[in-house]
Image (cartoon, rainbow, N blue to C red):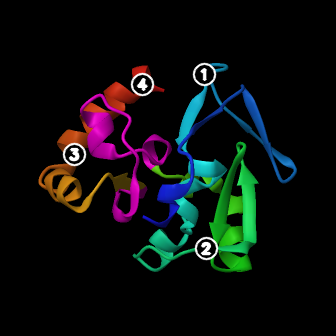
Amino acid sequence: MSGASLPRRSVLVGCSVLLVTGFALGHGGGAAAEMVDAPGGLALGGYDVVAYFTDDKPVRGLAEFASVFQSVTYRFRSAANRDRFLADPLRYLPAYGGYSAYGVANGVLAPGDPEQFAIVEGRLYVNFSKSVHSQWLRDPAFYIARADQNWLTLR
């Protein structure tokens, strides 16, 4: 991955209310922090989270179309994709903060590879590597159920 030289860090985001371009997103239940895999503060290594849904493939975003959401920078290939994201960011955010879905299913916070992705029931999942992703694809429902449980304690 091209971001390998950047220091890997988890960005904690949370609060009961988040402000995004003039409107509030309420998070029921209070101040649980959400962790995002964001090396150098950049989500998914700079890949456009909207393009996964519109193009069904990973597409690198451009710095000129970047936007910050929940203290993390997201890049987009176009202003139109950035605007789609800002209109409904929760629709496009990767599951488990962009950490490997297989890793989370197994109780581990492993980095997600933006090239290894799947959209299941309208949600974006990334995995650690091609071989891990192949394993995850054998039974995504099983791994998602386990990851959803584990994410409650890992985050």
Q: Amino acid at mark 4?
A: Leu
Front-most of residues 154 and 121: 154
Q: Position of residue 155 (x, y in %)?
A: 48, 27
Q: Which one is closest to the eye, mark 1 or mark 4?
A: 4
Q: Which mark is residue 32?
A: 1
Determine which quarter of the picture holds residue 131: bottom left
Q: Which mark is residue 51?
A: none
Neighbor class of circle 3 (other Cα within 10 Å; few <14, some 14-19, many 20+) is few
Neighbor class of circle 1 (other Cα within 10 Å; few <14, some 14-19, many 20+) is some
State which quarter of the image contains the N terminus: bottom left
| Secondary-structure class at tag 2 | loop
Residue that appears at 29% across and 39% down: 103
Q: Which one is closest to the eye, mark 2 or mark 3?
A: 2
Which region is colored magenta? 95-123
Report if residue 127 lies within the magenta region: no
Q: Amino acid at mark 1?
A: Ala
| Residue pointed to by mark 3 | 141
Neighbor class of circle 4 (other Cα within 10 Å; few <14, some 14-19, many 20+) is some
Q: CA distance from mark 1 to mark 2?
A: 29 Å
Left or right: where does residue 109 sit relative to residue 42? Answer: left
Neighbor class of circle 2 (other Cα within 10 Å; few <14, some 14-19, many 20+) is many
Q: Earlier in the sequence, mark 1 or mark 4?
A: 1
Above or below residue 40? Residue 52 is below
Q: Earlier in the sequence, mark 2 or mark 3?
A: 2
Q: Which one is closest to the eye, mark 1 or mark 3?
A: 1
Q: Earlier in the sequence, mark 1 or mark 3?
A: 1
Left or right: where does residue 132 sit relative to residue 72? Answer: left
Q: Which one is closest to the eye, mark 3 or mark 4?
A: 4
Q: Residue furthest right?
A: 22
| Residue pointed to by mark 4 | 154
Q: Amino acid at mark 3?
A: Ala
